[in-house]
Amino acid sequence: MFELVVTGAKGLDELLQSELQQLCPERATKLKPGQVLLEADLADAYRICLHSRLANRVLLKLAQGMVDQADDLYRIADSVVWSEHFDVHQTFMIDFIGTNRTINNSQFGALKIKDAIVDQFNSRMGKRPSVSKINADIRIQARFWRQELAIYLDLSGKSLHQRQYRQDTGKAPLKEHLACAMLMRSGWAENMAAPLYDPMCGSGTIVIEAALMAANIPPGRNRKVWGFSRWRKHDDTVWQQLVEQAESEIKPIQTGIFANDIDSRLVQIAKSNARAAGVEAAIQFSCADAVKYVPEIETAGYLVSNPPYGERLSEVTALLPLFDDLGLHLKQHFQNWKLSLLTSSRDLFRQLKLSAKKQYQLMNGKLECQLVNYDMDERNCEIRQTQPLNSDFANRLVKNIQRSKKWLKSQNTDCYRIYDADLPEYNVAIDCYADWLVVQEYAAPKDVPENKARQRIHQILAALPKIMQADPEKVVLKVREQQKGKEQYQKLAQRHEYLQVSENGAKFQVNLRDYLDTGLFLDHRITRQLVQQRASGKHVLNLFAYTGSVSVHAALGKATSVTTVDMSHTYIDWAKRNFQLNQLNGSQYQFIQADCTTWLVDHQAKYDLIFIDPPSFSNSKRMDNTWDVQRDHVKLLTQAKRCLKSGGEIIFSNNLRRFNLDNEALKTLGLDIEDWSQKTLPEDFKRNPKIHHCWLLTDAG
């Protein structure tokens, strides 16, 4: 008899224990988080390896002891007679799991056990086995919890969820043992005569595992190499008897299993995987839109699926309309069915407008998920007429759109704002960039519960494509909070997708996903026009230039020269692309990567027009000191005035809401001051009059 530990995924503990009780009915089992313990013979251990659909690993205990100091690891490992388990010419590897204050590094723990093993071989045989991290003959697992260490032989080798039939997968594939858990939790595993349908099958894991279940094919059937294959105590006779018995118990499939996906490539992958598993003939595949297609199934059955759910809130945007349509489709065509759907975003399932029967917590890899069961009874199949266009948010947005149409006729731009937290409970800004929409969610007040804020943003994202008649794939969600320093222009993604937009004769590249800001500040639309109108025949300097949009307008306004300065190499390159997009080329256009606050100190050139739009605060690593616009603006403008020609102009702007311009200090510099804040406020930003401050500072001569 051996002490075995059978490990499983979080959330599957009770299911795994129940399965092991069926496989080894004569053995008592004990449940611990993520594992089941039992005493069993070698045949039981082999049986679990071959037949368990839920287990990850089957571990056979070799030694156990308390650890008070690092040398105890060595002592416990040395208590095992390793030559009884493998030969000196074989390779081995060690997985060390767990740490505490004494042993706070798993690599150190593995090294101590390795030393004990090779030292023992050396002392007894004068030779030592080699460690291999790839395809080792023997796999050893050490599990360390509090002060107790247990050392095991891994009988499974690679994780048991790897069934060896996957030829290829789609994005974020479902693990095989989790698919089995879904089938068990759905109720289908106890009623396999009923039809099974996966409308979004991906690479086919759920339906393939269902077919293996229905045919009583052991999940380990295709595995050629096990953790015990080269173990010295392996009994091949016992193993072969179990394999032969399992083969004799395979039976024909008596149920209908149906798989569908909208992606023809994934359907071909699913077919290939099913073929490798030996169950392709048992599954009927189709390629269609899940919210439009109805399989030819005569009786109600089980719909079990892992629909897309997006790991980030921004990825949910395009999925909301899908789930809205899916809910209606299920109500219309799947009466009396039982549904079991996996998600990491339960809020997304609210779009189905179904009442759940039961919910289970599961782990899909490292992602916390919920498996939600629904009965498609009379209540759930009732179609309630929803009127999203009659909500307060929708009504306000429609009014804003109608109002925007009037002033847009006098504008020449495809970038503008249509909503800016007009209703406090719908705390977002919505900007149009050509046929794209960017939704910026302002951080919710602390007194608004997170779940309520999330529900409201989902309402917005669900209604927006319908109201705006926009493609849901072209709706981008961002969360806008107060940013400081290096957080200001932090990356959100790395898609490198650029969209061309236009504004008053200028063309710009914007990036709607990768950064919090898009590359074009829409509230400065009028400011850029004023720069263009004043730029003719002048030498123009643009400090803190960002992506160079003001520089482009100055160049289009026939400036004699335009110098663009920004600290970021990324934004200087972006500015250059914007110039190329507008066919602006020549030595009169200069691009300088530098910290504006220090570059200006030693700069000697003179300019007719200087545009300055600094951040509110910065502590970037590229700067020698921190920057605070309230504290440092006089010093900055003093340096700028030194580079200003007689009679020249500085347009100074910033976005700090509580900013106060030091008028007295600037007058002593010989600057006349004109407040342009209202003058430069575009019509679509008048709901938020403090979006920026702007002044014209003129050299008094």
Image (spheres, rainbow, N blue to C red):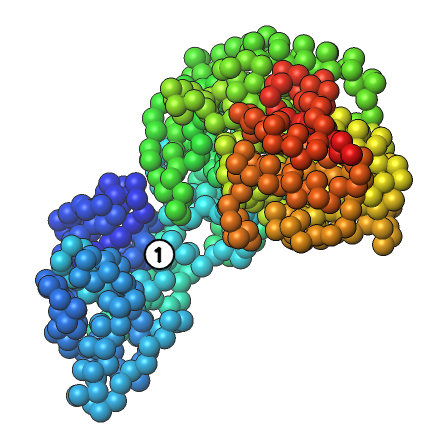
Which residue is pictured at 15% across the width and 47% down the height? 30
**Left or right of residue 692: residue 107:** left
Reading the image, the residue beneath label 1 is 160
**Left or right of residue 520: residue 477:** left
Establish if 591 lies above or below 508.
below
Q: Foreground residue, 14 or 318?
A: 318
Establish if 290 lies above or below 239.
above
**Left or right of residue 187: residue 638:** right
Establish if 298 lies above or below 77.
above
Q: Quadrant of residue 70?
A: bottom left
Which residue is pictured at 19% across the width and 77% down the height? 116
Where is residue 457 shown, x and y percent of the image?
A: 51, 23
Q: Foreground residue, 362 or 221?
A: 362
Where is residue 375 shown, x and y percent of the image?
A: 40, 22
Which residue is pictured at 41% across the width and 56% down the height? 162
User: Which three-letter amino acid code belongs to the residue tagged 1?
Assistant: Leu
Q: How many marks?
A: 1
Q: Quadrant of the C terminus?
A: top right
